[in-house]
C-alpha cells in the first residue's frame, strides 16, 4: 500500500498554505476568553473566511452541503492550519486527530469501529444507531 501523498493532495496543501499566508495576517487579535460577544464575532469572521474560500464543511459529504474532501485532504487541512497557527473551529480537536490520522497513514495502528466506516455507510445504517 502506497501512503505517499498524490500530486493532487500536494496541490491541495500548497493552495491551502498560500491561502492561509494571505488571510491570517488580516485577522484581528484573538479576543479575551471572557469577552463572549467579541469571541463570537471573531469566530464568525473566521468561519465566513473559511466558507468564502471553500474550506467550511470541507470533509462533509457534498449531499450534506460540504465539499466532499477525502480523509487525506481533511488531514492536510488539519496539518496546515495547525502549522500556520490558524484559529480552531468550534469542536475541532486538531492535534490529537491529526496525530491519530498520521499514525494510521504510517501504519502505526488502524482505523476501526464507527470511525472507519464511510459517511455513506453510516447514513445507510451499516453502523448501528447512526442514520
Image (cartoon, rainbow, N blue to C red):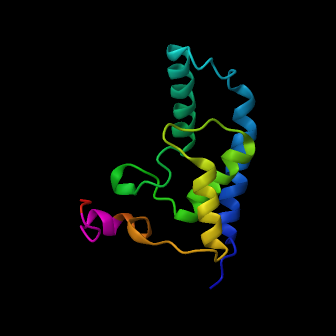
Residue 52 belongs to the span the image colors magenta: no
Q: Farthest residue to the bottom: give it.
A: 1
Depicted 82 relative to depicted 29: above or below:
below
Quarter of the picture containing the C terminus is bottom left
Residue at point 31%, 65% (across, down): 122
Residue 127, percent from left and from top: 29, 68
Nearest the viewer among 45 and 129 is 129
Residue at point 67%, 72% (across, down): 6
Residue at point 62%, 85% (across, down): 1
Residue at point 51%, 59% (across, down): 69
- In the picture provided, is 123 more to the left or to the right than 80? left
Q: Quadrant of residue 126?
A: bottom left
Residue 121 belongs to the span the image colors magenta: yes
Depicted 56 relative to depicted 12: above or below:
above
Residue 128, percent from left and from top: 25, 66
- In the picture provided, is 131 more to the left or to the right than 57? left
Q: Which segment did they paint magenta?
A: 120-128
Nearest the viewer among 48 and 78 is 78
Residue 48, percent from left and from top: 52, 32
The answer to whether residue 117 is visible is: no
Depicted 101 relative to depicted 80: above or below:
below
Depicted 11 relative to depicted 36: above or below:
below
The answer to whether residue 65 is visible is: yes
Nearest the viewer among 130 and 75 is 130
- In the picture provided, is 39 more to the left or to the right than 119? right
Amino acid at each position: 500500500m502506497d501512503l505517499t501523498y498524490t500530486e493532487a493532495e500536494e496541490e491541495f496543501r500548497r493552495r491551502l498554505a498560500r491561502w492561509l499566508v494571505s488571510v491570517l495576517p488580516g485577522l484581528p487579535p484573538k479576543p479575551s476568553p471572557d469577552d463572549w460577544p467579541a469571541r463570537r464575532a471573531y469566530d464568525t469572521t473566521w468561519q465566513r473566511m473559511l466558507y468564502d474560500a471553500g474550506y467550511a464543511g470541507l470533509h462533509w459529504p457534498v449531499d450534506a452541503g460540504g465539499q466532499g474532501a477525502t480523509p487525506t485532504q481533511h488531514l492536510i487541512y488539519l496539518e496546515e492550519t495547525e502549522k500556520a497557527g490558524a484559529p480552531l473551529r468550534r469542536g475541532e480537536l486538531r492535534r490529537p486527530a491529526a496525530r491519530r490520522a498520521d499514525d494510521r497513514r504510517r501504519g502505526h495502528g488502524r482505523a476501526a469501529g464507527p470511525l472507519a466506516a464511510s459517511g455513506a455507510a453510516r447514513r445507510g445504517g451499516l453502523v448501528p444507531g447512526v442514520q
